[in-house]
Image (spheres, helix red, strand yellow):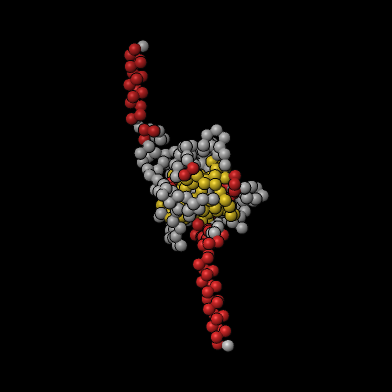
């Protein structure tokens, strides 16, 4: 029995250094690490994770993070882009924004967070032509407070006016979604490498694919996105190319669709600008009002002297 105990002790010591095929703690830095956004991998840095937020109900059940239900993409210091079906019911009515909480700057969903890493939601704007799980699956959450500028782990994602999304470009997507259909949500933010594909691939494999609204990609390896990933970004060449949306349940395999950012850029940018302007305090406009008033008075004075 002593020899058996000695052998067991040796095996337990050597076990963390043994090679694993499907991603144990021992090979987190290995390039072959895989784990079923389903089929994703863990990042080596926060280069992309700082653009993603966790969207949750206001209160958790047992531990912080068990109330996560969708992901979101930070597009300004107060605006989060996500899928409309995340924040609406079957009748397309928006949720009460006061019942939502956004967590940023955390890779681990279940990690403890402080008030510096969370914000309440003040307003929800859903695309006016949204049809549940079908089209225009976009919504913008306006946060009650700005994300602190000193928090370098949180940065809005670049939104280019133009992007050359040619076939074959390597992109990345991420989320805290289910690790398999109807399974548990991932604790860690998982990445999946994808490639821009021909629209014909999605036409053949996705019944409701619409080239006018969507970007077609294929996974570099096996993988799919599921509930909880919705609203996460598609990042190509360091800029926003789309978000996960327009799907019920898990989707993947040979082809995947993302809601195209470029197709909706005008609505997204215009909505954010409108929300920004509507929330500005009155004193912000006082210089403009003063300039207009002085010019009117000067014009009236000039007319009076000419008469």
Q: Which quarter of the figure is the C terminus placed in? A: bottom right
> Residue 69 location in percent, x, y?
55, 42
Q: Is residue 180 above or below residue 260?
A: above
Q: Is residue 224 among the parts visible in the rendering?
A: no
Q: Is residue 230 left or right of residue 51?
A: right
Q: Is residue 177 above or below residue 135?
A: above
> Residue 182 location in percent, x, y?
56, 37
Residue at 54%, 59% in the rendered image: 281
Work out which residue is located at the far bottom of the displayed protein and give it. Answer: 307
Q: Which quarter of the figure is the N terminus placed in? A: top left
Q: Nearer the viewer, residue 79 or 108?
A: 79
Q: Nearer the viewer, residue 92 or 298?
A: 298
Work out which residue is located at the far top of the displayed protein and give it. Answer: 1
> Residue 160 location in percent, x, y?
44, 60
Query: In the rendered image, which quarter is residue 267 located in?
Result: bottom right
Q: Nearer the viewer, residue 72 or 117?
A: 117
Query: In the rendered image, which quarter is residue 24 located in?
Result: top left
Q: Nearer the viewer, residue 199 or 14?
A: 14
Query: In the rendered image, which quarter is residue 62 located in?
Result: top right
> Residue 108 location in percent, x, y?
45, 39
Residue at 61%, 58% in the rendered image: 128
Residue at 55%, 76% in the rendered image: 296
Q: Is residue 240 above or below residue 30?
A: below
Q: Is residue 134 left or right of residue 78?
A: right
Q: Is residue 228 among the parts visible in the rendering?
A: yes
Q: Is residue 69 left or right of residue 149?
A: right
Q: How many marks?
A: 0
């Amino acid at each position: 029995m002593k020899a058996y105990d000695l052998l067991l002790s040796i095996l337990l010591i050597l076990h963390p250094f043994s090679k694993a095929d499907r991603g144990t703690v021992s090979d987190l830095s290995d390039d072959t690490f895989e784990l079923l956004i389903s089929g994703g991998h863990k990042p080596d840095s926060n280069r992309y994770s700082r653009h993603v937020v966790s969207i949750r109900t206001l209160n958790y059940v047992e531990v912080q993070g068990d109330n996560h239900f969708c992901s979101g993409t930070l597009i300004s210091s107060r605006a989060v882009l996500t899928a409309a079906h995340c924040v609406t019911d079957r009748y397309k009515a928006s949720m009460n924004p006061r019942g939502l909480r956004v967590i940023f700057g955390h890779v681990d969903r279940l990690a403890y967070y402080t008030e510096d890493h969370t914000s309440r939601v003040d307003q929800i704007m859903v695309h006016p032509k949204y049809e549940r799980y079908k089209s225009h699956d976009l919504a913008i959450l306006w946060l009650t407070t700005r994300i602190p500028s000193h928090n370098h782990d949180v940065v809005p994602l670049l939104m280019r006016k133009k992007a050359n999304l040619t076939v074959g470009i390597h992109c990345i997507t991420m989320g805290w979604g289910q690790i398999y259909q109807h399974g548990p949500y991932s604790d860690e933010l998982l990445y999946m490498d994808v490639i821009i594909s021909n629209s014909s691939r999605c036409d053949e494999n996705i019944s409701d694919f619409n080239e006018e609204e969507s970007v077609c990609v294929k996974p570099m390896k096996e993988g799919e996105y599921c509930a909880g990933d919705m609203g996460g970004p598609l990042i190509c060449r360091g800029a926003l190319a789309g978000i996960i949306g327009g799907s019920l349940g898990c989707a993947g395999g040979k082809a995947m669709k993302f809601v195209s950012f470029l197709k909706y850029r005008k609505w997204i940018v215009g909505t954010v600008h409108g929300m920004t302007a509507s929330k500005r305090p009155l004193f912000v406009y006082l210089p403009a009002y003063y300039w207009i008033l002085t010019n009117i008075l000067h014009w009236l004075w000039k007319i009076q002297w000419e008469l």
